[in-house]
Amino acid sequence: MTIFDEERLLFTPASPHSDAIPVIFAFPNEYSVGITSLGYQIIWATLALRSDIEVSRLFTDIQESLPRNPELLGFSFSWELDYVNILNLLELLNIPIRAEKRSENHPLVFGGGPVLTANPEPFAQFFDLILLGDGENLLDNFLDAYKEVRKADRQTQLQHLAKVPGVYIPSLYEVTYCSADGEIKSIEPLLDIPFPVQKQTYRGNTLSASTLVTSKAAWENIYMVEVVRSCPEMCRFCLASYLTLPFRTASLESSLIPAIEKGLKVTDRLGLLGASVTQHPEFEALLDYLNQPQYDPIRLSIASVRTNTVTEKLASTLAKKDTRSITIAVESGSEKIRKMINKKLSNSEIIQAAVNAKAGGLKGIKFYGMVGLPGEEDTDVEETVKMLLDVKKTAPGLRLTLGCSTFVPKSHTPFQWFGVNREAKKRLKGLEKQLRSQGIEFRPESYNWSVIQALISRGDRRVSQVLELTREYGDTVGSYKRAFKELRGKLPDFDYYVHDDWKTNQVLPWSHIKGPLSQDTLLKHLWEATNQNN
């Protein structure tokens, strides 16, 4: 019996016909991690439901029986640092890492997911094609177009696929630079193909739900339902909000309830997903539905919730269903910083959320915070400490945790022009010292890896050379600095990508990728952020 035999499927895969396209669909991490990704599950099920596709799954630790001559190799890519595993899996399959070195005998290598949609350029040399945006319609459109040129030569296939909205063929767009180690001069298409390339947005009111449940997932036996997509708050640093606009909600009657009923037939663990789940317009009705007696035994998990939606009713519902704590993103205890980043939230609302959580029977709250945000000073970090101490005083006995990251600039957001603040490392250490002495648990994300995340987040095509070298050097933080040293003169220095503030009129690595909002709109939001006190 294999790990795949333990899956309980919530759909019936099609039987591939004799001439079905052999496809490998990979996740660049272990099975337990990959199978917990709702995006991976949905794309795999979409492939498996087509009788013209014969799909095999591949993870870093386990695989299904793979075709000898696959025509397509796809990757679901949701965490930047998993790129190392993409390169490892390509080598495992005897496929050249760089797209330009592949021949007619190799499969077309495609990828999708939030990392590639945000900024495909650091990985552009490794993929033949990239699917930008929501996969609901895009994947089927891509496969149908591929069938039209299935027997053609590789270049003909790529030129044909480039005309499918949302399909980006990096080799058909030329990037020129002011100098080898200078800024980007221009990005131009080489043929009559879409320019800019439009990210695809699914606008239906039926969102995603798990297609399988397994005890081998990182979240054991969980059935996941996507309640909302994007976030209406539009915090100015937030990729999850800006890149995925507009805010969409699943219909309660026609989508959410049928999906939940389907999942709870095979498991008693339910996860409600979305960047802002409690802002679903019918969330109260959803809570009432889950409070019915027949659902008393279920275990309920909810993704991060908005502070002012933490009611006593929500807390008691979660407490009854085996949830001990909730997660709230507050970013900072400083009113000034929250105003700048467009976090519409007051300290009194944060304190009230804690009071409600405790009254409803929850045992703890995990706050998400951030240091190094544009405009932040040491006094703003002190405000975060003060706010948490006020929460502790007002809701005694509630276990408080602060998970804290460093601000990393993200494409398609108003803060994409800012670099990483070098003071963030010191501020993380300061928070740790002050909070732990007060009995508040502190969980910092690694500053050093945040810096590497920034490199990848803002990287252009030249960064692919760095990524290849660091893999050879052992993939440690020091490996990246060593790679830049070796490549000196061939691309800008490390600080350019990571710490420098960029000019608002320069060509960005993703300037040819059309996101939900125009550059002018992002600049307007940036101006509003930086002119709060004028």
Image (spheres, rainbow, N blue to C red):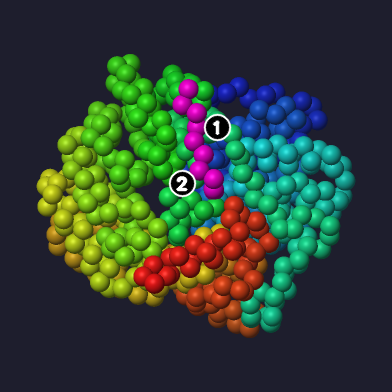
Quadrant housing the C terminus? bottom left
**Residue 147 percent across, percent down from the top left:** 81, 38
Q: Mark 1 packing: few (<14 Cα in 10 Å), some, or many (20+)?
A: some
Q: Position of residue 364 (x, y in %)?
A: 22, 44
Q: Quadrant of residue 518?
A: bottom right
- Residue visible at 76% across and 43% down? 71
- Asked whether the viewer can see residue 11, the reply is yes
| Image coordinates for residue 197, horizontal then vertical, percent | 70, 55
Q: Secondary structure at mark 2?
A: loop
1 or 2: tag closer to the N-terminus = 1
Seen from the viewer's position, the closer of residues 298 and 150 is 298
Outermost residue, top side:
294
Residue 388 picture quarter: bottom left
Specify the amino acid type for callout 1: Asn
84 with respect to 197 (left or right): left
Quickly name the residue at label 1.
Answer: 205
Q: Which residues are magenta?
A: 244-253
Tell me if 237 is positioned left or right of 458 in this view.
left
Q: Where in the figure is residue 336, as x and y percent of width and height? A: 31, 65
Amino acid type for the residue under numbered disc 2: Cys
Disc 1, SS: loop
